[in-house]
Image (cartoon, rainbow, N blue to C red):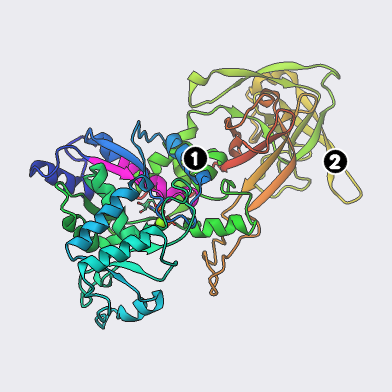
Amino acid sequence: MDNETVSRNFIEQIIDKDISEGHCREVHTRFPPEPNGYLHIGHAKSILLNYGLAQKYNGKFNLRFDDTNPTKERSEFVEAIEEDIRWLGADWEDRLFFASDYFGQMYEAAVKLIRKGKAYVSDLTAEEIKAYRGTLTEPGKDDPYRERGIEENLALFEDMKNGVVEDGAKVLRAKIDMASSNINMRDPVIYRVAHMHHHRTGDAWCIYPMYDFAHPIEDAIEGITHSICTLEFEDHRPLYDWVVRELEYEMPPQQIEFAKLYLTNVVTGKRYIKRLVEEGIVDGWDDPRLVSIAALRRRGFTPESLKMFVDLCGVAKANSSVDYAMLEYCIREDLKLKKPRRMAVLDPVKVIIDNYPEGKTEYLDAVNNPENAMLGSRKVPFTRELYIEREDFMEEPPKKYFRMFPGNEVRLMNAYFVKCSRFEKDAGGKVTEIHCTYDPASRGGNSPDGRKVKGTIHWVSAEHAVRAKVRLYQNIVDEEKGVYNEDGSLNLNPDSLTVLDNCVLEESLAGARAYDSFQFVRQGFFCVDVKDSAPDHLVFNRIVSLKSSFKLPVS
Ligand code: ATP
Ligand code: MG
């Protein structure tokens, strides 16, 4: 694609117009997470979108914690969120902000509205406010305290702030329009009393602003030009605009909504991930089966692969779901040329080469990545006793089975041609060892005399094998039946985790460290687990298998 034909997404079109009409001097975006959980792939989309726009337009990008609701917010989440955003490559430089730093300004803003006759203190209970609010088809009823005088409102709001009012006994409401067709405009509550300890402001405040009031103020204070949020806030936009207008900000920010990112058969909502964590169904927020950013990192996804994914998804104005296979496609594409290939046997069975000298070790050359010569080559030890995958041997092979079976000759990858002569089984009929003879003239896996073999299998020297645990994953929710059961519970896939305890790896993997990743030939891409792996006890997670029927949609 050349530059002329790259189409601008709808947000870029809005920004272009704002710039050309002189409404925006410098593009300024933000990512405003609430520190009440870990970030997930949907947030990654929002982060990369906001950061990407700031970069593209040579503007600024803020990270702002939207910590106005102390009930669920914790410092633990603040740190985790920062780590995730940094890892994704979005750089907020010195622009890290906390909404709680603006509590003083928000309080002043509320006082300003009261003085303008645009806000009032109400004594209605939460239930009464709900009952007075009306429905989508019926207008609301005026609050009996709506016409309270300005002085009285100021005094009562002061009382709320000073801690003389009990939780829930009074609220501050914006005075807008109880008959509005938009329920959000029917005198929304903008401040409530809550005697709660806040993770940053401690006990300094016992009144807290509501999201719809706080968010536009935060944006305005920071000079945000384009406040990008998800579609569910579309109906809140008139309130956003009302707040910035009534508070008379000179260059008011503009809210723009885009569609949330949903993945098929994956739990994305913070609420649901939290449930899996709290019910102990997964091993924490970073369990590799989840799509939190921490989990994707632990599983072995790269920032580049997530960026590719988000770019492929595009920015839309209508909700839709993206196939999980597209995420897998992106990580495969990213790792394919970058990562060395290694031989690892996940379900080993012993092979003995009867005509190979006992006690001998030979080091054979193996190319690290046939598609990328830059990755060079390595030496792999070859010995009389080896392991191969159990599924690479069959006593009675079906047609078109080209791997090892009695009488058949195959190539051991990077090594020799071997021919199976016999095998042994235990009482249960399980194959315990396979005997072969090798052809010394086929060293390197090349045909000595034009002889053809149809199968090439990977192997690991028994003497030099590195033992490891390998974990294979499937989607945590059931592919066939959908994410939720009728009663709202999660439809869990009982096979989402398979642990293989007796895997053997080639010697070169001995020093593998957390986050190192490799292609295990024929098995997929694997990453060393950051929590459970140790030098003498390696644990690998499968990032993704090699094969997929996924095709990029042609646009
Ligand atoms: P969740 O819906 O998972 O609980 P949230 O919206 O409550 O997430 P916040 O911390 O409030 O989480 O969100 C921070 C920002 O991330 C918001 O601007 C929000 O619109 C955006 N965001 C959240 N989920 C998605 C998603 N699935 N796709 C794109 N952006 C998202
Ligand atoms: Mg939220």
Mark 1 residue element: helix
Residue type, mark 1 in image: Glu
Magenta region: 28-51
Left or right, 65 with respect to 539, comes to left
The residue pinned by badge 1 equals 79
Work out whether residue 395 or residue 161 is closer to the camera in this orientation and state it.
161
Give percent across and percent down for residue 496. 62, 54
Relative to residue 92, is residue 60 drawn left or right? left
- Badge 1: how crowded within 10 Å, few (<14), some, or many (20+)? few
The mark found on residue 432 in the picture is: 2
Residue farthest toward the left in the current orientation of the protein: 21
> Left or right: where does residue 510 sit relative to residue 239?
right
- The answer to whether the residue bearing label 2 lies less than 8 angstroms from the nearest atom of ligand 1 is no
Under circle 2, the secondary element is strand
Q: Is residue 555 visible?
A: no
> Looking at the image, which residue is at 25% across and 72% down?
186
Q: Position of residue 56 (x, y in %)?
A: 24, 35
Query: Splitting the image into 4 quarters, where does residue 305 fall?
Result: top left
Q: Quadrant of the N terminus?
A: top left
